[in-house]
Image (cartoon, grey):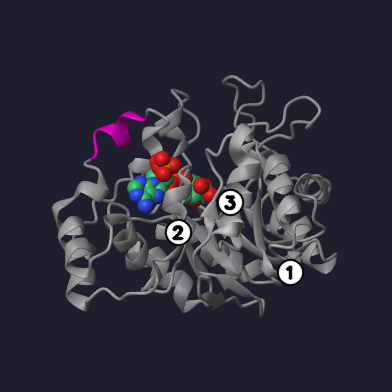
Amino acid sequence: MAPTLKLNSGYEMPQVGFGLWKVDQATAADTVYNAIKAGYRLFDGACDYGNEKECGEGVARAIKEGLVKREELFIVSKLWQTFHDEDKVEPITRKQLADWQIDYFDLFLIHFPAALEYVDPKVRYPPGWFYDGESEVRWSKTTLQQTWGAMEKLVEKKLARSIGISNYQAQSVYDALIYAKIRPATLQIEHHPYLQQPDLVNLAQKEGIVVTAYSSFGPTGFMELDMPRAKSAAPLMEHALIKEIAAKHKKTPAQVLLRWATQRGLAVIPKTSRPEVLAQNLDSTTFDLESSDLEKIAEMDLNIRFNKPTNYFSADKLFLFG
Ligand SMILES: NC(=O)c1ccc[n+]([C@@H]2O[C@H](COP(=O)([O-])OP(=O)(O)OC[C@H]3O[C@@H](n4cnc5c(N)ncnc54)[C@H](OP(=O)(O)O)[C@@H]3O)[C@@H](O)[C@H]2O)c1
């Protein structure tokens, strides 16, 4: 079982969890069930991953068979951009909870700091980035402050125990800290040796916000999407320094990449479709890197971001990380 981190909401969050992006519907229920069996307690889902119903089936099966109790799990989900309008937040959260067959999320995040015009789930679900499902971007006039107010109501109504943010950069974090009545418990960001974002991590940690690293393996997670930027980057797991550190500690390169984050106080949520890899990723907090290892990895920062809309779409309108 993974160690836990204490959130500013008072709840404990497992430091290593399982990421559910790109887990297809056909295998999601078994994947979640097997991950629970392997000892995972945190699951990182989202409306956008299109598999919440199936993930919920995996959870329900594990609970029914007595493998785990609901309160031992830490289920994370996210608010998609088309549901940022204040009156849309609670209804979509209730739908997502129903999909998961649970009555509260342990943590609910604003997925991206961008509000898009509402798309009725009856029209298309998950709605994706484009109003017409193809290329048209329609912004909503709702501010992040208004959406955060609606997220705070989820806590009041006990639909979410903790709330947080994802893909925010420093300016929007500073802004959120001014208007938040409930401070964000976590900030989930892309974080690996090629994109370290030290100022953002420092800001969050100094403000008592736990940082969750996503895409810890850098380009590897984006290969299955055929992303040119990922294909042209050297795989982190084959990087000479990472391999050298792994050999020294008798660990795998993947475990080194995860430990690099957890040893610095971050949480991680690796995804794998291979049952035999589940244990390896979960068992990545039982050794320590040397400070010289951490210093050398710090020098690998290239500031390469894989997960940004302009890497996916030819659309020239979603400059979220500009
Ligand atoms: N908030 C956001 O906007 C956001 C964005 C991206 C991701 N996330 C979250 O973060 C999670 C993880 O990120 P990610 O899915 O981008 O990728 P990741 O966990 O960094 O990488 C997954 C890739 O690494 C491979 N892999 C996993 N463990 C391995 C190991 N021990 N040895 C060798 N290869 C290994 C997997 O292949 P196999 O499947 O074949 O093992 C897969 O191709 C997501 O699932 C999602 O929950 C959030």
Task: Using a 10 Å C-alpha cutoff, classify the residue at mark 2 as few (fewer than 14 neighbours), some (14 to 19) or many (20 or more).
Answer: some
Say if residue 306 shows up in the picture.
Answer: no
The residue identified by callout 3 is 34
Q: Quarter of the image holding residue 231? A: top left
> How many marks do you count on the picture?
3
Residue 241 appears anywhere in the view: yes
* Nearer-the-camera pick, 90 or 178: 90
| Looking at the image, residue 144 lies above or below residue 208 | above
Magenta segment, which residues?
227-233
Q: Quadrant of the C terminus?
A: top left
Query: Residue at the location (45% across, 44% down)?
Result: 274
Residue 90 x, y percent position in the rendering: 82, 51
Q: Residue 289 vs residue 153: left or right?
A: left
Residue on which disc 1 sits: 71
The residue positioned 53% from the left and 60% from the top of the image is: 17
Three-letter amino acid code of the residue under disc 3:
Asn
What residue sits 18% from the left and 50% below the top?
Answer: 239
Which image quarter: residue 104?
Answer: bottom right
Q: Amino acid at mark 2?
A: Ala
Quickly name the residue at label 2: 279
Left-right relation of 253 to 33: left
Label 3 SS = helix
- Position above or below: 220 against 136: below
**Label 1 to label 3: alpha-carbon separation:** 18 Å
Residue in the picture at 55% in, 39% down: 23
Check residue 230 for magenta coloring. Answer: yes
Q: Position of residue 103 (x, y in %)?
A: 82, 58
| Mark 1 or mark 3: whose residue is earlier in sequence | 3
